[in-house]
Image (cartoon, rainbow, N blue to C red):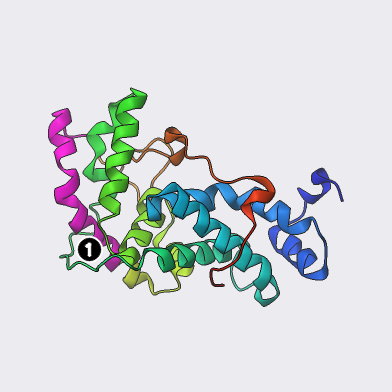
Amino acid sequence: MDEATLGDISDQDLLARHVAGDPDAFGEIVRRHRDRLWAVALRTLGDREEAADAVQDALVSAYRAAHTFRGQSAVTTWLHRITVNACLDRARKAASRKTSPVDDTERLDQLIEPHESAEAPAERQDLHRQLIEALGTLPPDQRAALVLVDMQGYPVAEAAEVLDVPTGTVKSRCARGRARLLPLLTHLRADTGGSGESSGGRNRTPGTSVPPASETNDAGPSGSAAVKGGGGRA
C-alpha cells in the first residue's frame, strides 16, 4: 500500500493493520507522531541522546505491544503514555526534592513571560537552555507533568490520561514543580526589566513564551532509525 493511501487511514485502523501483519502500517504511525514524542522526551530528559533512546524504547514497546491496545484512549495518548514511562524510567535516578505548592494559575510560561518579546535566536536558545536545565532539577514525575501541561499545552485531563494518574495529581505535580522552578527562573524577569502579560488561557497556544524544541534544532530521530533496539514498557 502506498504512502498516500496509508495517510488516509486512522491511527486506530493503522494499529489494527499492524497487528494483522501489514508491514507498512506502524511506520506510518511513527511518521505521524515521532516529532511530538521526541519533543516530550527531550524536554522531559533534557539530553538529546537520552531522549533519542527513550523514544526508541517507547516505539519498540509500542510495536511489540500493539496487540494490547483496546481503543479506550486515542492512539496518540497511548503512545505518549509509553514515551513518558520510558522517560521516567530513565530519569528516576534523580533524587526527589520537597517543594511547596503555589497557586495553579502560575504557569511555567508566566514565570518567563518577559522574554516573549525577544526575537534574537541566540536569546531564545539561551532561554530554552536555561529552562531545560531548570527542569532537570525537578523530580521526574513533576517534570513530566510540566512538560505535558505547560510546554506541550495538554489540558490537565488529557495529561492525566497520558500519565495514568488522577487530574488532582497532575495539578499538584505542576504546582510543586512551578514552586521549585520559580527561584531558578525569576531572574529572567529582572534581566528584561518588564512584566509581560499573562497568556490568560488554561492551556498554552502557539507563540507563547516557552520556545519550541525546533528553535534549538532539536530534530528527532526519523525514518526507520526511529525503531531499533528494545526496552521500554507499554
Q: In this view, does 217 lie above or below 22?
A: above
12 over 37 or under it: above or below: below
Give the main secondary structure of the magenta stretch: helix
Residue 174 locus on image (x, y percent): 29, 61
Residue 129, position in %: x, y? 31, 40
Q: Give the range drawn in magenta.
A: 172-196
Q: Is residue 22 left or right of residue 220?
A: right
In the rendered view of the protein, which quadrant contains the C terminus?
Answer: bottom right
What residue is drawn where x is 81% and y is 59%?
A: 23
Question: In the rendered view, does 1 fall on the left or right side of 96?
Answer: right
Q: Residue at x 54, y 72 (%)?
A: 233
Q: What residue type is labelled 1?
A: Arg
Closer to the camera in the image, 44 or 80: 44
The mark tally for this picture is 1
Identity of the residue drawn at 30% across and 33% down = 126
Pointer 1 residue? 176
Residue 156, image x, y percentages: 39, 62
Q: Nearer the viewer, residue 201 or 160?
A: 160
